[in-house]
Image (cartoon, rainbow, N blue to C red):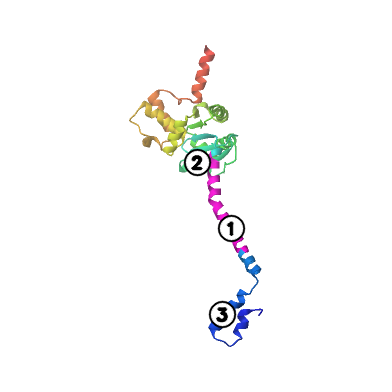
Amino acid sequence: MRNPLSDLDSIKANSQLKTKTLQAVMKKQPLKHRSYGWGILALGFCFLLAFFLQLPFSRSNTAPAVKKDIYAYVSIDINPSMEFQLDKNNKIIHIIDYNKEAANVLKQKDLTGYTIEEAMDWLLTDKLIQDYMTKGFMQVSVYSKDTTHSVALEKVLNMVLSANLDASQYGCSHASEEEHRSASKHHMSFGKYQVIEEIIKLNSDYRIDDLQNKSMQELKTIYTQLSGNTSFPNDHDSHHNENSKHHNK
């Protein structure tokens, strides 16, 4: 029989007999054909199993890789508040906007893949940023576990800032690991957190929640009133003043 089912349909017999006959015919089919079919199915199943088992591991291996590549952080605060995460070559690999003002600025251009110097050049010529800077103050802060890299990066940023802004319009400093970690817990940039921390040291009546949504110019005014200093600790003005003292000696 070439086709057992169709051939059986032409035979006039009860269903029980047909079933028994079909079973007998199937038993006589060559074993090698049946084995071959099951082998193909088993092999396909193994491939599918290996594929699905590999998926979770692929995701878990790629997720931490981005974090591991972060070598330095730069926060920028005016009223827009943002953080750039950099690789070892100071190229931006991730950006965080901490308020809607920052989101509005950053949606104009994807700065991922740019160097921090290129990003700063663009930001300082952006119309939205320039509007904020007419009566605003820009605070830039740097953090890296590699302190040598952190100092070098701070110098580079100071050069870019000084070429575009008046000295009274900006500050540039470096942050500690504790300041960076604490700022993340409060979901704010570590540059702004540093300034708020200094204000609270001078007047413990202030709370982080009271100051978190204020612009950098407002925070600078509060700090100046409390301390009598026109620049924050570690800012470029402080470095300039120290250098002046050395030269005067």
| Residue kind at label 3, given as amino acid type | Lys
Viewer-proximal residue, 142 or 134?
142
Residue 151 at x, y percent in the picture: 54, 26
Residue 56 located within the stretch drawn in magenta = yes
Q: How far apart are marks 3 and 2 (CA)?
A: 73 Å
| Residue 107 visible within the image | no
Whether residue 37 sits left or right of residue 235 in the image: it is right
Q: Give the range drawn in magenta.
A: 39-67
Residue that mark 1 sits on: 46
Residue 209 at x, y percent in the picture: 37, 37
Q: Which of marks 1 and 3 is nearer the N terminus?
A: 3
Residue 27 at x, y percent in the picture: 61, 74
Viewer-proximal residue, 94 or 196?
94
Residue that mark 2 sits on: 96
Q: Check the image and report above or below for 246 versus 224.
A: above
Q: Nearer the viewer, mark 1 or mark 3?
A: 3
Residue that mark 3 sits on: 20
| Residue kind at label 2, given as amino acid type | Ile
Crowding at label 3, few (<14), some or many (≥20) Cα neighbours within 10 Å? few
Viewer-proximal residue, 32 or 209?
32
Quadrant of the frame with the N terminus: bottom right
